[in-house]
Amino acid sequence: MDRSELERELERLHSESWGWALACLGYDRASAEDALQSAYLRIVSGQARFDRRSSFRSWLFGVIRYTAMEERRRRARASLRLTTANEGIEAVDPAPAPDVVTERAERAALLEAGLAALSVRQREVLQLVFYHGMTIEEAAGVMKVSLGSARTHYERGKQALAQRINQVDVR
């Protein structure tokens, strides 16, 4: 794949890539921006090479996931250093939780909370399948797990999410 074709594909998939980076980093915008920029840099510089063993999209999401994991580890180490340096100082976020104004916002918050309660693998496979339109097989490739494992995480994640949403609706 030549550089111009690579850049066109990256541009075409940018909005989905951004969504995936956000999901991989718990919707932390700053971390997602850093991870996505690092992933693009790896790809454009040739550090990560598309070998055509999967679709470009699946490969790209795998690079983003790997880079996001590195970003999460980097930030955790930095946070640990900061916490150790400032022992005894606790910073509490004084901002109140926002009121949910509409039914749609309530359902979105409920869904987000339900997804957050899932295991990382369950959340990742559901995110890839539902929000990025991948097949379970493509999601397995991005996640670097077997197809059977991805199917299991997918089914268990759907069941856990439905159960959690139904519990809240009953209350």
Image (cartoon, grey):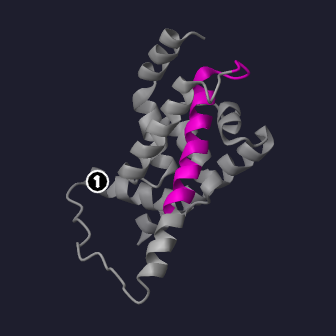
Q: Quadrant of residue 106?
A: bottom left
Give above or below for 41 relative to 108.
above
Dominant secondary-structure state across the stretch colored magenta: helix
Q: Where is residue 75 in the image (x, y as percent from the top left)?
A: 49, 60
Magenta-drawn stretch contains 105:
no
Q: Position of residue 81 (x, y in %)?
A: 49, 72
Q: Is mark 1 on a helix, strand or loop?
A: helix
Provide the residue span drawn in magenta: 51-75
Disc 1 residue crowd, few under 14, some 14–19, many 20+, Cα 10 Å: few
Task: Give the residue at the far bottom of this rendering.
Answer: 88
Q: Residue at x 58, y 47 (%)?
A: 124
**Residue 67 placement, left or right of 101:** right
Picture quarter with the N terminus:
top right
**Residue carrying label 1:** 105
Q: What residue type is labelled 1?
A: Ala
Q: Nearer the viewer, residue 158 or 92?
A: 92
